[in-house]
Amino acid sequence: MDVTGSAATLRAACDAARAHGHTVGFVPTMGAIHRGHARLLRQARHECGFVVASIFVNPLQFGATEDLAAYPRPIERDTAEAERLGCDLLFVPDEKEMYPNGPHTITVDPGPLGDCLEGASRPEHFRGVLTVVAKLFGMVGPSRAYFGEKDAQQLALVRRMAAELNLPVTVVPVPTVREPDGLALSSRNAYLSPDERQAAPVLFEALSDAAERVREGERDADVLRAEMARRIGAEPLARLDYVAIVDDETWEDVKRVERPARALAAARVGPARLIDNLLLPWDGGE
Ligand code: PAF
């Protein structure tokens, strides 16, 4: 595996791979590689001739009070992991390489979907995400780019960006990887104390209960939302941020679960802000 911090070297390597007829697959990350990232990388390895991963803790997507400085950066372990998982080229730029002229004047506007849920709690977050993802797409030129379903709103926005800006990339969703007790893997789980770690699966439990209630016949989304909020609110170590049930295509709030709908939850558990989501079962399938 080659490692570079240079966008020019990255571009040349991707051009060469394409010239050799390889499909370029791309896995953007902020590092602290865990089994969720491993799943993205394995799928990319399986489907593409040349696999690029990036590690960049993107300041543009962190709010002033968020954990940018504290975000874990175990770069040596990450490099070894990326290599072990079959990555061909690891791009590890510094801030100067990504933003050589300082703050951007041109950014990607995520539109209304960028302002709700995660966007309401983290203003400007998705502008930062889409801007860096667009830049990375421009540098790598991937045919396929892999994003985890755990960050469902991010995934939906990246898909919309690719579709609406006619970017020649297929955005590939990859299922969430969970601990045995249901907790979705996240780099932020590292912030949890043992007690908080025990409490953290409450998000998944609330989402799973909602899915079970739908299976039993409950269709009223307000009832399901109230039950999820109650379940998370009953956990003393969790501070609920939001629960939601949205149409899986439009991301509008639904009144009744009669089409594919996604349940989402966000809560602060100790120092960590955790998010999770589940596609609810519906008559047409899971
Ligand atoms: O999901 C992440 O790790 C980040 O938001 C991403 C897509 C790498 C952009 O910085």
Image: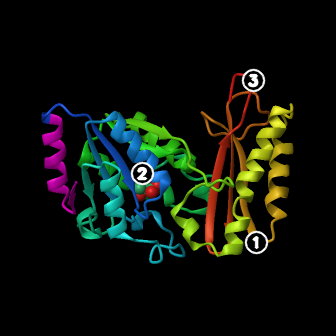
Question: Which mark is drawn over residue 283?
Answer: 3
6 in magenta? yes
Q: Mark 1 belongs to which amino acid?
A: Leu
**Residue 159 in the figure: left or right of residue 195:** left
Q: Residue at x 73, y 66 (%)?
A: 199
Give the extent of the magenta segment.
1-18
Identified by mark 2, the residue type is: Leu
**Residue depicted at 31% across the width and 48% down the height:** 86
Question: Percent x, y for residue 78?
Answer: 36, 63
Residue in the image at 77% along x and 33% along y: 257
Please tell me whether the stretch drawn in magenta is mainly helix, strand or loop: helix
The residue labelled by disc 1 is: 237
Q: CA distance from mark 1 to mark 3?
A: 35 Å
Q: Using the image as rendered, state which of residue 225 and residue 210 is in the foreground.
A: 210
Q: Earlier in the sequence, mark 2 or mark 3?
A: 2
Q: Residues within 10 Å of mark 2 (few under 14, many from 20)?
A: many
**Splitting the image into four quadrants, where does ligand 1 fall?**
bottom left
The residue singled out by tag 2 in the image is: 130
Say what amino acid the circle numbered 3 marks: Asp
Instruction: Using residue 84 as the reference point, say whether residue 174 is left or right of it.
Output: right
Q: Position of residue 50 (x, y in %)?
A: 25, 41
- Can residue 65 be seen here? The reply is yes
> Where does the C terminus fall, quadrant-wise?
top right
Regarding mark 1 in the picture, which secondary structure is present there? Answer: loop
Of the numbered discs 2 and 1, the one sitting upstream in the chain is: 2
